[in-house]
Image (cartoon, grey):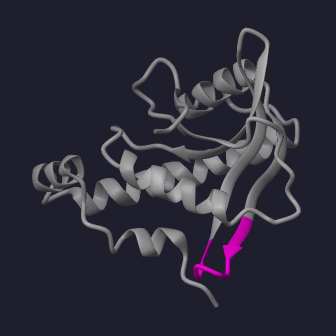
Amino acid sequence: WLPSCTEILKALPLSRALLGWKKRHKDDGDAIRDEAATRGTAVHRMVDRLIRGETLDDLDPYAGLLMDWWARAKPSVILHEQAVANEADGYAGTLDLLAEIDVGFGERVMCLIDFKTSRTSAGRERWQAQLAAYSEAMPERMVLPDPGLMLGVLRLYEKDERADFLFPLD
């Protein structure tokens, strides 16, 4: 048994942005977190359906955002919802998506992508750490093309007109 990357990251001090958010939402923070988790689960199910070639209900605002990004990025999926472990450093986790994606101008890159449904990017530092940890836990058999693996977050929020693809995540 190895602790999850997400659990380990909870032990890190909160960023100034997250501290401010917690202060502003001291009464409803847990409810907002739980609502985001429910949205996140729904988005993961939608990705499963897209990978299987199914159509999504475009009345769902997250489905519209996800389908728009999917059409633009044209992901060639390598791994999806894949458990990974770094036994040397003692952690494990589940990566959301490893895919070759179109980043414009005919250029395609290999990208490790995490899906987020938060309203803000306040957790960006933790997102970076999470993706970096997953990249270090990739299966050894994975041979990545030059220039290597890019890390990115696809942030979907229903009130936005377009999904934010934070790439490269730095």
Looking at the rendering, which quadrant does residue 12 occupy?
bottom left
Q: Look at the image and tell me in which quarter the N terminus lies.
A: bottom right
Q: Is residue 59 visible?
A: no
**Residue 148 higher or lower than 31, as above or below:** above
Compare residues 33 and 69 and report the one nearer the observer.
69
Looking at the rendering, which quadrant does residue 55 occupy?
top right
Apparent side of residue 129 relative to residue 94 in the rendered image (left or right)? left
**Residue 61 higher or lower than 85, as above or below:** above
Q: Is residue 101 magenta?
A: no
> Which residue is pictured at 57% across the width and 32% down the height?
60
Compare residues 19 and 109 and report the one nearer the observer.
109
The secondary structure making up most of the magenta span is strand
Residue 54: percent from the left, percent from the top?
84, 36
> Which residue is pictured at 52% across the width and 70% down the height?
5
Q: Residue furthest bottom?
A: 1
Residue 28: percent from the left, percent from the top?
20, 56
Q: Is residue 72 visible?
A: yes
Which stretch is magenta? 83-92
Q: Is residue 87 magenta?
A: yes
Q: Residue furthest front?
A: 146
Compare residues 123 and 105 and report the one nearer the observer.
105
> Which residue is pictured at 24% across the width and 54% down the height?
15
Apparent side of residue 24 relative to residue 160 in the rendered image (left or right)? left
Residue 132: percent from the left, percent from the top?
56, 55
> Which residue is pictured at 40% across the width and 43% down the height?
118
Residue 19: percent from the left, percent from the top?
17, 55
